[in-house]
Amino acid sequence: MTAASSKTPAGWVNPLLDSRDKRLPRIAGPCGVVIFGVTGDLSRKKLMPAIYDLANRGLLPPGFALVGFARRDWADENFAELVHDAVREHARTPFREEVWARLSEGIRFVPGSFDDDASFDDLASVVADLDQQRGTGGNHAFYLAIPPATFPVVLKQLARTGLAERNGDQWRRVVIEKPFGHDLNSACELNEIVNDVFPEESVFRIDHYLGKETVQNILALRFANQLYEPIWNSNYVDHVQITMAEDIGLAGRAGYYDGIGAARDVIQNHLLQLLALTAMEEPLSFSPGSLRGEKIKVLSAVKLAEPLDETTARGQYTAGWQGGTKVVGVLEEKGFHQGSTTETFAAITLHVDTRRWAGVPFFLRTGKRLGRRVTEVAVIFKRAPHLPFETTMTEELGQNALVIRIQPDEGVTIRFGSKVPGTAMEVRDVTMDFRYGTAFTESSPEAYERLLLDVLLGEPSLFPVNAEVELSWAILDPVLEHWAKHDGPEPYAAGTWGPPSADRMIATAGRTWRRP
């Protein structure tokens, strides 16, 4: 041992070597996935293609196993054909026969219903056989791609058969899709039901937005650059707008959507998570505990702006023109009840009661059949305190803005004032764009690829815990209760940017909505 090394503290890791290690691909160890609800769109369009893409990228173990469970009279070959067709149609990476051949060897199917003990006994036997045949090592993730109402019976069966139990170094995990409850009380009940079978560290609640590269880029943008941190506060930020706009209607989902609405479907999870990442303090590290701790602090400090009549808005789209096509209103969508007060547009105003964000309003909005499909976080800065120009020189100058585009054109835009070429001093807004699609040679993986791999690796950073879910409902519940006591949603024409009440809401605060 050298003199230098003898002074090295116990447990010290060379940061250079450590960073090199973390740049290596993260490859899952021996494991398998059991999907309940394999015949649904989520499984066919997202989960199965994501599993293939991970295998194609060499990130799954050679003996990986995929088990489907559904009420179908299928053999393993029938299920494998379903997976094959889904992969060929929806996979992000090119189809390769050698990858498919290896993956298909581990595909199994168990027919049955959720309340059938014999079917779950068969599932337990199949899982045990895979441990022997494929070397999955007793490590299995159970993906509940099913309605929340069916969670209790499935969880009870997993507990009864011992499938939820882990022995020694083995792991068993459960993956849950949103919605995480219907309100705060139901979310607490659901969390209790899940945690009766799986400990919280084994529960992975999927919010697919958190798997998107540009969402994670919020953390990189903020904490890897000295450029932004000094101005990321109420001294310089005027307000923040978080938007998730869709140009599609409810075709095919009207029955599911009716009774849920835009606020429950998007604001409670996606938008409040984006707010937390935007407003959180710098974590001590990017460990799961540190990240979650800071997000929980922010959500604990979020308060609704009042009065709710003026600081919230909701609407339903009516017939109109979308991309040159005549479309029907939501009340004409098949499966949506006439007279329903379920909103297809929702907007709320929030404050984050911390020293950093005191006095800065956060405006959140989401809707169907809006002007275009876009999700973005726009940080709007205050105007310069003094402009040594005549008014006519800056009449086209707006406020500086930093816009993080989540979809579809992933990237970052910075808006600032610049002189117009010519002999006169005239200043107007220009933009600088960073686009993922042109800046990097490697295409971004799908969100479900990242999240599924994190499940198999036991990396919970991007998955909300009980406290985050319950705090989000605590924020939204008063709005839902207020809306339930008042008139229904305001109509807005398809292809527009929402009801007039949304414009009045933000105008009350002295601001205007961005047009993405």
Image: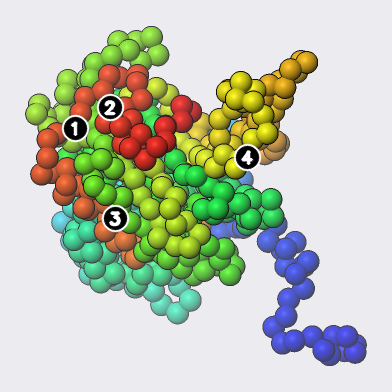
Q: Are marks 1 and 2 in contact (CB under 8 Å)?
A: yes
Name the N-terminal-most of marks 3 and 4: 4
Q: Is residue 39 visible?
A: no
Check disc 2 and give the amino acid type.
Answer: Pro
Residue 371 spot, x, y in % from top left: 39, 22
Q: Could you tell me how far apart the alpha carbons at marks 1 and 2 are, in whole angstroms?
A: 9 Å
Observer-side mark, 3 or 4, equals 4
Q: CA distance from mark 4 to mark 2?
A: 36 Å
Report if the CB atoms under discs 3 and 4 are less than 8 Å apart: no
For this view, does 410 lie left or right of residue 156? right
If you read the primary sequence from the N terminus, does the residue marked by circle 2 or circle 3 appear first? 3
Residue 264's x, y, as percent?
27, 45
User: Which is nearer the eye, 363 or 373?
Assistant: 363
Q: Is residue 130 placed above or below 416 in the rendered structure?
A: below
Mark 2 neighbour density, 10 Å: few (under 14) some (14–19) many (20 or more): many
**Amino acid on which the number 3 mark rests in the picture:** Ile
- What residue is shown with label 2? 499
Instruction: Quote the CA–CA distance across marks 4 and 1.
Output: 42 Å
Label 4 sits on a secondary structure element that is: loop
Residue 179 visible here: yes
Above or below, 363 relative to 227:
above
Find residue 386 and name its label: 4
Left or right of 459 in this view: 433:
right
Kindly identify which residue carries mark 1: 489
Residue at 48% across, 76% down: 169
Of labels 4 and 1, the one closer to you: 4
Q: Earlier in the sequence, mark 4 or mark 1?
A: 4
